[in-house]
Image (cartoon, grey):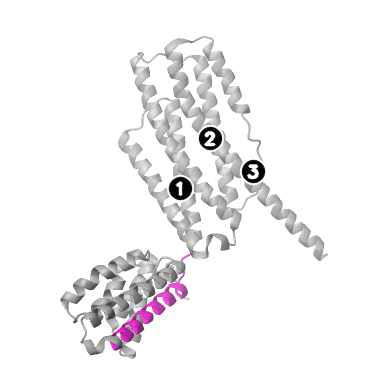
Amino acid sequence: MLRLSILKLKMPFGARMIKTALAVMIAVFLAREFELNAVVAAITAIVNVQPTLSRSLHNAFEQIIVHIVGVIIGLTIGFLWSPGPLAMGIATPLVIWSALRLGFGEVVMALMPMVIILSSPEEAFLSEALYRSLVIFLGLAVGMAVNGLVAPPRYRDRLLVSLQKLNTATVDFFTEMTNDFIIPQQKPFEAYEEKRQEVKSILKESRLYLELWNEQLGRHKSPFPWQDQMLERYIDFNANLYHKCKDIYENTKERIAWREHMGNPVISEEFAAILAMLQHGLIEFQRLNEQLRRSIFEGKPAQSYPVDDEFWQEMSDYVDMWHEKLTGAYYMHALLFLAVVANNLKYGTRATKEFLNMINEKQSAGTFAKRNKSAVRS
């Protein structure tokens, strides 16, 4: 099997481009060998080289159906009306309407046989229809064969790599936004927007690879059922962290503006203790996230954690102590600013623990199953 990944390192284009070129070469060669229309065969093969084999199969089925639609309408109009531009003008909307009515979007592939048939002499209708069908099926076969046999893409590997990049970028972004609130300081909007777009781009890439992986084997045919289900949830987890970064950024901006309005008062010891608790919670989230990464991407054993509010109750006690010395509008504003960041951090910590607990449960169940199999054999 061709190792197109090696070529990809040396050429400015990917494996799918090379596969498309290979499909065109084979289709044209075979068409010429059988004295068929090489151009039409090449076009059909190009259209059928899809990102996954399942897409190629679906695309091939669609092309066959719309091809038949084009042939039938072309033959019907040809018999009822003399071939030529006027007949094509009448047939075109009928072909488009029929293809769309059947739920297919490849109207171009339906128009091509109709145009070829109606541009032929009247006595050549049936032979032209058969000729066109042979060329279509040749292109479909070549496209599917090349797509399925030559360097089939390993989308799960790409997904795992993309997810590691996504989590690194997202957690770094979340950590930076939380630290900026604690200091407090405002990240320049240009730098913030650049980082936000970076994470958004990786998130989009991860979702694309997940979709292609599901198509490649089918959601219910995966050899890694619960792992892949977890990966889908893991993308959502990182997406939520990404959106919470915006909340923290806007919240920090409002906090700094409020402090400037109040003359930048000195942070009290009580509130400094609360911010220290927040910093401790952030460090704990980073530690848990690193454990989760090792469990997902390295297969390390996952530890079980109680999902409780003990830490946040302790922070609440510090807030009560702070409230004893401060009341009024300044207290309310500061509390609201604090609540936004604390709740977002609480989400990250809780969700990470839930992931670790789920993995721990699955790993324990897998170990138990292996032990049972060994006991039966012995």
Relative to residue 324, is residue 122 depicted above or below? below
Q: Nearer the viewer, residue 111 or 361?
A: 111
In the picture, the quarter occupied by the C terminus is bottom right
Which amino acid type corresponds to the residue marked 2 in the rendered image? Answer: Tyr
Report the magenta stretch's main SS: helix
Give the residue displayed 49% in from the left and 45% down from the top: 236
Q: Residue furthest left?
A: 85
Using the image, tell me which numbered label, if any, was put on residue 149.
none
Q: Whole-percent x and y of residue 375? A: 81, 60
Relative to residue 292, is residue 251 depicted above or below? above
Q: Whole-percent x and y of residue 214? A: 50, 60
Question: In whole angstroms, how far apart are the C-alphas of marks 2 and 3?
Answer: 15 Å
Labels 2 and 3: the sequence-earlier one = 2
The quadrant where residue 34 appears: bottom left
Which amino acid type corresponds to the residue marked 3 in the rendered image? Answer: Asn
Using the image, tell me which numbered label, if any, was put on residue 166.
1
Give the residue displayed 54% in from the left and 38% down from the top: 286
